[in-house]
Amino acid sequence: MIHIDLNVVDRDLSFDEVLTPAQLTKSDVISQDIKHRLLESGLPFLLIGQRNINSIKMVLTEVELIVEQDDRLVPGTIQVFYGIDKSIKVLAQTKDYGQEAGN
């Protein structure tokens, strides 16, 4: 299967040097889809100002469950990390492209 999509940055299309909409391919498409799915779920926003480690862990578990629903990923390979800078990083193995990282 070929994965191609338009690159969306800050809720707007990204354009290349000649003002053609930029495209994503392969695992970058999967990463973008997962990022949008997480933003639509509202889960990342629950972490704003959160200091309770148990609440953070619950949200990260929910993030992992949402990511696990993507059938383009190998089940059981999803890892979710919460950075010191309050960022969420997801690592997973894709069925078609191997080990990939997404933010």
Image: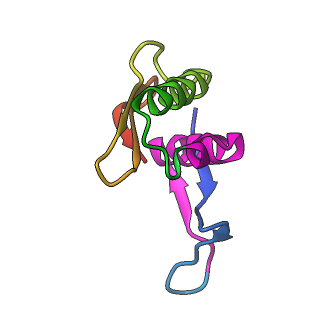
Nearer to the camera, 69 or 64: 64
Q: Is residue 9 above or below residue 71?
A: below
Q: Nearer the viewer, residue 53 or 35?
A: 53
Q: Where is residue 40 drawn, in percent x and y?
A: 71, 45
Q: How many tags in the picture?
A: 0
Q: Pick out the residue farthest to the front.
A: 52
Q: Is residue 48 above or below residue 16?
A: above
Q: Nearer the viewer, residue 34 or 96?
A: 34
Residue 44: which quarter of the image? top right
Q: Residue at x 43, y 12 (%)?
A: 76
Locate the N terminus and report the quarter of the image it occupies: top right
Q: Give left or right: position of 102 versus 11.
A: left
Q: Position of residue 59 (x, y in %)?
A: 54, 31
Report the residue that reaches farthest toward the top: 76
**Numbered range of the magenta stretch:** 20-46
Majority secondary structure of magenta residues: helix
Is 40 contained in the magenta span? yes
